[in-house]
Amino acid sequence: MELILDPWPWYVSGPLIGLILPTMLVALRKPLSISSSFQDVCAATLPGGHAYFAYDWRRNAWRFAFVAGIVLGGAVAWNVLSTPDAVVAISDATRADLMALGVDDQTGLVPPQLLGWGALATLPGLIVVVGGGFLVGFGARYADGCTSGHAITGLANLQLPSLLAVLGFFAGGLLSANVLLPAVLGGLR
């Protein structure tokens, strides 16, 4: 049995995402915080490590269930709701730009040349996966929250630091997509 689901329209999914914030604040009296959740996981699994992780992570134990729900939801979405041969809907111009950068396999959600296991054996792939992962993690903690946290929670609370962080995230994304990624992918050609 093949299950095909179309994406929900923005006017349905957007308000549902927006309702997560008040639900979390009312139910748990805690803000939504995924990057802090990963900090708690590191503090729990690396005892006696860096001073940054030397705090009582047990007071935030609810975040472990939150992270487990994200992982479980991703597994269900991948194994139950996805179609392996589905074509990702991206513009012809983007496909052409990727081809010009040497990314010719555009099947699946992300190009395997960039984020597949085989990509780790190449210098550009290693830079994109490991370097990019480090920069995202470091940036999320340095900005005291990730892109989603600032864009959903911070902006909903009208916090100026979140607005500045979101503007910085967008500027960094534009720089990465238009300057850094072409420079790194030059090695794939």
Image: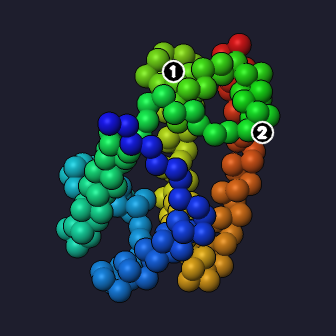
The residue under the point 71% across, 64% down is: 167
- State the mark number for residue 164: none
Side of 41 where 111 appears, left or right = right
121 to the left or right of 77: right
The residue tagged with tag 2: helix, strand or loop?
Answer: helix
Residue lying at 65% horizontally and 64% vertically, measured from the top left: 166
> Which residue is nearer to you in this view: 82 or 58?
82
Which kind of residue does numbered mark 2 sit on? Asn
The image shows a total of numbered marks equal to: 2
Q: Which residue is mark 2?
A: 178
Q: Earlier in the sequence, mark 2 or mark 1?
A: 1
Quadrant in which the C terminus is drawn: top right
| Camera-side residue of 69 and 126 | 69
Q: At which x and y percent is residue 53?
A: 31, 58
- Which residue carries the number 1 mark? 119
Q: In which quadrant is the N terminus drawn?
A: top left
Expressed as whole percent of the image width and height from the top left, the position of residue 15 reads 54, 74
Residue 5, position as x, y percentages in the image: 46, 48
Residue at the farthest top position = 189
Q: Is residue 4 above or below residue 29?
A: above
Question: How many angstroms separate mark 2 from mark 1 (CA)?
Answer: 21 Å
